[in-house]
Amino acid sequence: MARVIGGVILDLQNISLSFGGVKALTNISFDVREGEIRAIIGPNGAGKSSMLNVINGVYHPQQGRIVFRGQERRRMNPHEAAAQGIARTFQNIALFKGMTVLDNIMTGRNLMMRRNFLWNALYWGPTRREEIAHRRRVEEIIDFLEIQNIRKTPVGRLPYGLQKRVELARALAAEPSLLLLDEPMAGMNVEEKQDMCRFILDVNEQLGTTIVLIEHDMGVVMDISDRVVVLDYGRKIGDGPPDEVRNDPVVIEAYLGGAAH
């Protein structure tokens, strides 16, 4: 499908978050448009992961407004955020290491399973049909991310780069409209990064999924992002297209340094 950037689907206004006396985020505002890849960058401790945790309901800011798809959110938890179409991967892989790739991805379908525990215990009729439908969707994701040959392998036996891809698959199994990726390429070698970049672009372009991405590799960020927001010590210091951010003197001074050119 042709890529189209639409209107604002997520609007964060004057977000402030503190833990005790420590300010993690101070008066941060930015938006995310439907269909775009929106990067959040900044040095360690800048507040990037805290911002993702605010978006998917892990943290509740003391100040500010969060508007998702035109509705202001109050105190939403991660389960409610997932039900609204927000999925997340983590900086540290959060998979079930003893389970197979297929079963790990199936856990991403939990929110969509309609039958109650009694139906599931009996496992017949509607429950069986439902599981077959979910499994069919999971197999499509496995094909999409080119992991057919490891579908029956326990995740704990896989190299790091493939585990990251399985985590992406599990997030996609929830069929999110907004996908939050927390350092999806951390710890990868060059080849693994190239693969992950390609899959992120495919998810965005072919599935039409809006993506918010935290990433330290500036080459990756500048190549695949539509817009970049820059945080430093919990404050926003830059926001705009990659080239504009790359050449912003404040950003260069605070973060990019000589790597900006």
Image: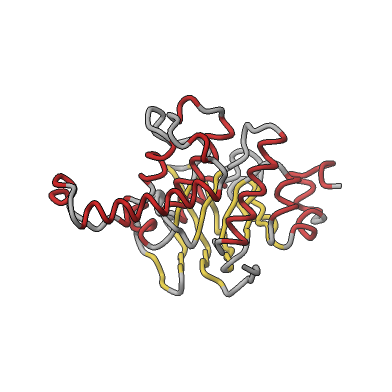
| Nearer the observer, 6 or 61 | 6
In the figure, 167 relative to 85: above or below? above
Residue 80, given in percent of the width and then of the height, sits at 34, 58
Q: Is residue 131 left or right of residue 98?
A: left
Q: Which residue is drawn at 59% across and 63% down?
A: 30
- What is the number of callouts on the image? 0
Which image quarter is the N terminus in? bottom right
In the figure, 65 relative to 258: above or below? below
Q: Which residue is drawn at 68% across and 61% down?
A: 227
Residue found at the very far right of the displayed protein: 261
Q: Which residue is drawn at 56% across and 35% down?
A: 162
Q: Is residue 130 left or right of residue 122?
A: right
In the figure, 162 relative to 29: above or below? above
Residue 234, given in percent of the width and then of the height, sits at 58, 48
Residue 185, given in percent of the width and then of the height, sits at 62, 39
Structure colour scheme = secondary structure
Q: Residue at x 82, y 42 (%)?
A: 259
| Nearer the observer, 244 or 143 | 143
Residue 218, given in percent of the width and then of the height, sits at 73, 45
